[in-house]
Image (cartoon, rainbow, N blue to C red):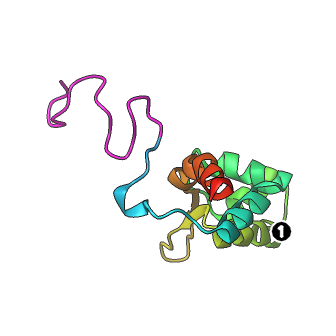
Amino acid sequence: MVPGHGRGPGAARPGLGRRGVPVASPELSSPPSVEQLLLRMTALSHPVRLRLCRHLARSAYSTGELAQAHGMTAPEVSRHLGVLKRAGLIITRRRGRYVPHQLDVTVVARLGGDLLEGVLR
């Protein structure tokens, strides 16, 4: 057992399953609407936004950092981030002038199940 953590080796962290895969939180139990699913799938269908998501899944980055990493202008990245944010796929937290964006991994992990549920409704 790790001192001070209260759980033994192999124990899942809160919000994560046994293999580190995000699990749905109880407060997120209501399924998204078909329109919300369409918005999310459309947002992820663009190759640039998908590349940005892969980057944002690893850590939080500002618009400028993403622009530099992907060889784009900040306004281009900002437009793509706006689409991802409206789709509910990224989390943005302002820290003074620094505005880091990060992929909401829990929402993305639920997307397949939510899509299936939306189709079967």
**Residue tagged by mark 1?**
76
Q: Position of residue 46 (x, y in %)?
A: 84, 56
Q: Is residue 59 visible?
A: no
Q: Residue furthest front?
A: 121
Q: Which quarter of the figure is the N terminus placed in?
A: top left
In the shown orientation, is residue 101 left or right of residue 77?
left
Callout 1: SS: helix
Instruction: Give the magenta range.
Output: 1-21
Q: Residues within 10 Å of mark 1 (few under 14, many from 20)?
A: few
* Residue at left offset 73%, top offset 53%: 52
Q: Position of residue 14 (x, y in %)?
A: 31, 44
Q: Position of residue 100 (x, y in %)?
A: 56, 64
Q: Position of residue 109 (x, y in %)?
A: 56, 46
* Residue at left offset 64%, top offset 49%: 116
Q: Which quarter of the figure is the C terminus placed in?
A: bottom right
Residue 113 lies in magenta, yes or no? no
67 or 113: which is nearer to us? Answer: 113
In the rendered image of this protein, does residue 41 appear above or below residue 57?
below
* Residue at left offset 78%, top offset 72%: 79
72 or 106: which is nearer to us? Answer: 106
In the picture, residue 92 is in which quadrant?
bottom right
Q: Is residue 91 visible?
A: yes
Question: Total marks drawn?
Answer: 1
Q: Amino acid at mark 1?
A: Glu
In the rendered image of this protein, does residue 10 appear above or below residue 29?
above
* Residue at left offset 69%, top offset 71%: 35
In the shown orientation, is residue 29 left or right of residue 76?
left
The dominant secondary structure in magenta is: loop
In the shown orientation, is residue 95 left or right of residue 51?
left
